[in-house]
């Protein structure tokens, strides 16, 4: 959206968060998005995950002086359930965790491995602090806690006259300072513009209030208790019910203090790890909690101060936000601050080799559980292998990667294969609710210049004045835009007829200024409106696990008829399979052969895109088969010849104008080609 409007402050958006959240981390995705691709978007989160593992080993080795302890500590960090889930996501919480952990490593090196003002670590701390705030504003909580707990010893190092062991060259210092100033300038400019537009550098006051803790210190205490229950993170309904009962028993009549949602209604912990509601795993949380408490009574100063950072950051975050069940990802930054204490704890635990090995085994099992069971991005599909009536190829994500249109269809219900056949270009308007998935429309219809607007039914707190499109403007868009896409319902368009509507709940409706544009297809998943535009002979009713997944074509000949009001250059996309080996299918239009499709083996799938010229009036597409089933076959004696899995009819130039009201709604035996056929 920013790219299409050529600004960091887009005027058109469907969610206030798209406008007020800083984009320090999101800007890294620009290299992918500028080419209308979402391949590799999670690479930055995965690199952050690897950074956490490597830095965990490095810092733990320095603290414990034992490679085996450092290995187990890094394995424990790698197995943290939410880290595994975020590593294949695009959320910007795990990068903050990596930066916070690197903060600790740089600080350790300054305190214990040399001093001076010209070392790389000083500039790294400056750059990371500024960039971290530009990624997510709540990094300020970690910086504040860090300054309180480590400010004095770092100040003493800065003021020390001891010689610098590893001075940083002047140009490198200048480059790091310039990068930090650039980040600070961007952050200040973004905050100033947001304050100008909404009255606050954090966004509209209504939005901030809707997410904040309304009850001060009392609310912070209640929220800390709730987050603690969530972080125990035992999957399953049994623990959920137990936690809810314990929550209500402890908080009693004040169960709603500090939050905006009911804990009993919204707290979830599914068996399959789900990023929005997962913690870091029970073993990781319990070990981190025990280590943090132990570090408060330990003589090792670095671990003690780190534990104070952990508790202070946790308290500040519980105080600032109202409780919401999906806020646990914010605490990724808090978990990594427990690593110095965890390294000491594991070093003491390492006196018993069996105990250390047990922690390692539990960590590996937790890593496998999170990676294989990820509800959104599992290595093994949690869905049945038999999907839509056919055995899926393994691994399933290979086919999804190669066919992005199908991948997006599973997410949104929109048949982008079919939509892309129209070749839209020009101006598009996308009207969507707050949590609608809009990005696939940008990627799959990249020749359109999009504007985005919130739905008329949406009243998210603090939307800028004029952000919601008035009804009159929306009605004009249906008549003037090359494509108007409405995700959900819009009462403004009740009198308009969409040329295409996605199936299922949360339907997406498509309108165009070209009133002749219709859904001229038997798509893979069906279209009642599209099916009414054709008359069929020897084409059976839809069959399959999902309605209109496929249709049997019957021998010796099947035909599909449609009417056009004028002569057009068209193309038809076909996907067929045949139960017979050496099957041949001759495809003709209006009596003129276009191609012969050959099936070498039974079950082969053949795709073809065939151009042809239509006539004004009745047009007939015919399929002549070499082989079809006899009376004694397994299909009830029906003369089945081939499966029609997909059929999409589109213009080669312009758009097709079908006169649906003239079509027969029954099979048409003995259809004759039009006399004017070319």
Image: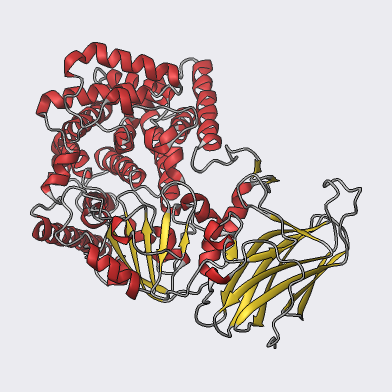
The answer to whether residue 233 is left or right of residue 621 is left
- Residue 285 is situated, as x and y percent measured from the top left of the image, at 37, 24
Residue 57 visible to an observer of this rendering: no
The answer to whether residue 437 is left or right of residue 272 is left
Picture quarter with the C terminus: bottom right
Say which quarter of the image contains residue 52. top left
- Residue 158 is situated, as x and y percent measured from the top left of the image, at 15, 46
Q: Is residue 504 above or below residue 234?
A: below
Q: Image point 19% across, 35% down: which residue? A: 321
Say which quarter of the image contains residue 5. bottom left
Q: Is residue 45 above or below residue 265?
A: below
Q: Pick the residue in front: 292 or 8.
A: 8
Numbered disc total: 0
Residue 483 visible to an observer of this rendering: yes
Colouring convention used in this rendered image of the protein? secondary structure
Picture quarter with the N terminus: bottom left
Q: Pick the residue in front: 519 or 406.
A: 519
The answer to whether residue 202 is left or right of residue 409 is left
Farthest residue to the top: give it. 249
Q: Is residue 627 above or below residue 525?
A: below
Q: Image point 22% across, 39% down: which residue? A: 142
- Residue 653 is situated, as x and y percent measured from the top left of the image, at 53, 83
- Residue 130 is situated, as x and y percent measured from the top left of the image, at 21, 53
Q: Pick the residue in front: 307 or 467.
A: 467
């Amino acid at each position: 959206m920013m790219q299409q409007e050529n600004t960091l402050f887009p005027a058109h958006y469907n969610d206030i968060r798209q406008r007020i959240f800083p984009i320090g981390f999101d800007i890294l995705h620009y290299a992918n998005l500028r080419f209308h691709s979402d391949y590799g978007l999670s690479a930055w989160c995965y690199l952050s995950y690897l950074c956490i593992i490597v830095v965990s080993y490095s810092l733990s080795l320095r603290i414990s002086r034992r490679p085996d302890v450092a290995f187990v500590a890094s394995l424990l960090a790698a197995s943290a359930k939410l880290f595994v889930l975020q590593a294949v996501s695009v959320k910007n919480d795990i990068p903050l965790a990596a930066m916070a952990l690197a903060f600790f490593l740089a600080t350790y090196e300054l305190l214990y491995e040399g001093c001076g003002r010209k070392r790389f670590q000083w500039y790294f701390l400056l750059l990371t602090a500024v960039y971290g705030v530009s990624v997510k504003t709540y990094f300020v909580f970690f910086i504040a806690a860090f300054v309180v707990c480590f400010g004095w010893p770092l100040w003493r190092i800065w003021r020390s006259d001891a010689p610098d062991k590893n001075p940083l060259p002047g140009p490198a210092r200048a480059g790091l300072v310039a990068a930090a100033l650039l980040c600070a300038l961007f952050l200040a400019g973004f905050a100033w513009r947001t304050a100008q537009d909404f009255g606050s550098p954090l966004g509209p006051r209504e939005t901030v209030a809707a997410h904040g803790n309304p009850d001060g210190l009392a609310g912070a205490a209640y929220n800390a208790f709730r987050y603690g229950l969530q972080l125990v993170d035992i999957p399953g309904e049994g623990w959920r019910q137990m936690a809810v009962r314990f929550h209500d028993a402890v908080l009693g009549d004040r169960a709603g203090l500090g939050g905006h949602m009911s804990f009993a209604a919204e707290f979830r912990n599914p068996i399959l790890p789900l990023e929005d509601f997962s913690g870091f795993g029970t073993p990781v949380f319990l070990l981190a909690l025990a280590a943090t408490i132990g570090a408060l009574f330990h003589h090792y100063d670095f671990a003690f101060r780190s534990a104070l950072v952990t508790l202070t950051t946790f308290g500040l975050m519980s105080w600032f936000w109202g409780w919401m069940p999906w806020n646990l990802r914010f605490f990724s930054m808090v978990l990594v601050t427990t690593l110095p204490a965890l390294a000491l704890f594991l070093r003491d635990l390492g006196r018993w080799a069996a105990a250390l090995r047990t922690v390692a085994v539990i960590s590996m099992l937790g890593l496998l559980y999170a990676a294989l069971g990820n509800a959104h991005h599992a290595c093994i599909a949690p869905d049945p292998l038999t999907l839509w009536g056919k055995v899926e190829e393994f691994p399933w994500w290979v086919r999804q990667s190669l066919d992005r249109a199908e991948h997006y269809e599973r997410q949104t219900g929109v048949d982008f294969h079919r939509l892309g056949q129209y070749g839209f270009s020009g101006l598009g308007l996308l009207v969507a609710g707050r949590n609608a998935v809009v990005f696939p429309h940008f990627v799959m219809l990249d020749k359109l210049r999009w504007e985005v607007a919130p739905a008329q039914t949406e009243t998210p707190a603090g939307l800028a004045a004029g952000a919601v499109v008035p009804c009159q403007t929306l009605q004009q868009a249906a008549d003037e835009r090359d494509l108007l896409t409405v995700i959900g319902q819009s009462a403004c368009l009740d009198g308009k007829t969409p040329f295409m509507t996605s199936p299922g709940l949360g339907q997406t409706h498509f309108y165009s200024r070209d009133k002749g544009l219709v859904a001229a297809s038997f798509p893979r998943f069906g279209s009642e409106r599209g099916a009414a535009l054709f008359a069929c002979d020897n084409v059976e009713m839809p069959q399959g696990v999902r309605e209109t997944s496929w249709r049997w074509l019957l021998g010796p000949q099947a035909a599909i008829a449609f009417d056009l009001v004028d002569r057009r250059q068209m193309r038809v996309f076909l996907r067929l399979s045949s139960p017979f080996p050496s099957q041949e299918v001759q495809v003709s239009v209006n009596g003129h052969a276009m191609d012969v499709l050959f099936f070498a083996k039974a079950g082969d799938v053949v795709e073809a895109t065939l151009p042809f010229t239509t006539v004004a009036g009745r047009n007939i597409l015919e399929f002549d088969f070499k082989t079809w089933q006899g009376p004694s076959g397994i299909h009830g004696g029906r003369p089945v010849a081939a499966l029609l899995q997909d059929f999409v009819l589109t213009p080669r130039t312009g758009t097709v104008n079908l006169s649906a009201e003239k079509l027969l709604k029954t099979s048409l035996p003995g259809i004759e080609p039009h006399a004017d056929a070319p």
